[in-house]
Image (cartoon, helix red, strand yellow):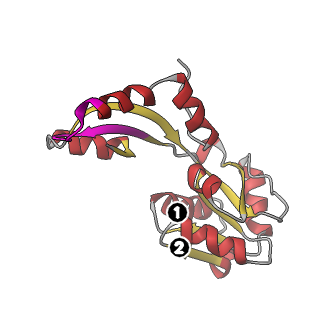
Amino acid sequence: MVLLPADMIAALAAKNLLSDSVALGAVGIGGVVRESASVPDISTMDALRAALVAAGAVLLTHAPTGEHLVGVIAQLGLRDAIAPKLLRFDTSTKLNIHLAARGDNALGFGPETEIRAGQGVRWTGDVPDEIQIALPYAAAMVMGTPNEAAARKLLAFLGTPQARAAFAKTGVKFAAP
């Protein structure tokens, strides 16, 4: 069984490596601060701009979400103002660990599920809809799995309201039925 971004599931299925998939929902990007920090408003483009300017540091990953936000910073006309306080990390986990250890009002960004799983940090909210990118995820069975019946049973469960409720608590969002 694999749980991956939906485009990766499709690519692996096209190579006949996977079968029987189920959509799991989408993970968006948002803000993260250390647990004891004040939570800045990033819900609108104006609020995001003000929060970026006010932050003691801006933390992004080298992943596609980080690259996307570098472009957003440039679009907001803040490239020069943010460059001296911009820190980049290979993963959201490393970003969260660094942020939790800081003593200032640093503001980071990453996938909601990874922020909510981090320790010493807290979710500040989604970035504005105008710049949001949500990555859809899916689960699929690996071809030739030795326990096909159990894998099919797990896949069936992942599509239930009970499983969706559990995923929603981690930040996974679902389209309206």
How many numbered marks have been drawn onto this rendered protein structure? 2
Q: Residues within 10 Å of mark 2 (few under 14, many from 20)?
A: some
- What amino acid is found at the position of numbered circle 2 in the picture? Phe
Q: Is residue 164 left or right of residue 109?
A: left
Q: In terms of secondary structure, where does tag 1 sit?
A: helix
Q: Is residue 112 left or right of residue 37?
A: left
Query: Regarding mark 2 in the picture, which secondary structure is present there?
Result: strand
Residue on which the image places disc 1: 66
- Looking at this view, is 19 or 132 the one in front? 19
Which residue is drawn at the image coordinates 76% and 68% (left, top)?
Answer: 53
Residue picked out by circle 2: 89
Looking at the rendering, the stretch of residues picked out in magenta corresponds to: 137-149
Residue found at x 39% / y 45%: 5
Residue 134 percent location from the top left of the image: 51, 43
> Residue at coordinates 17% horizontally, 43% vertically from top-left?
17
Amino acid type of the residue tagged 1 in the rendering: Gly
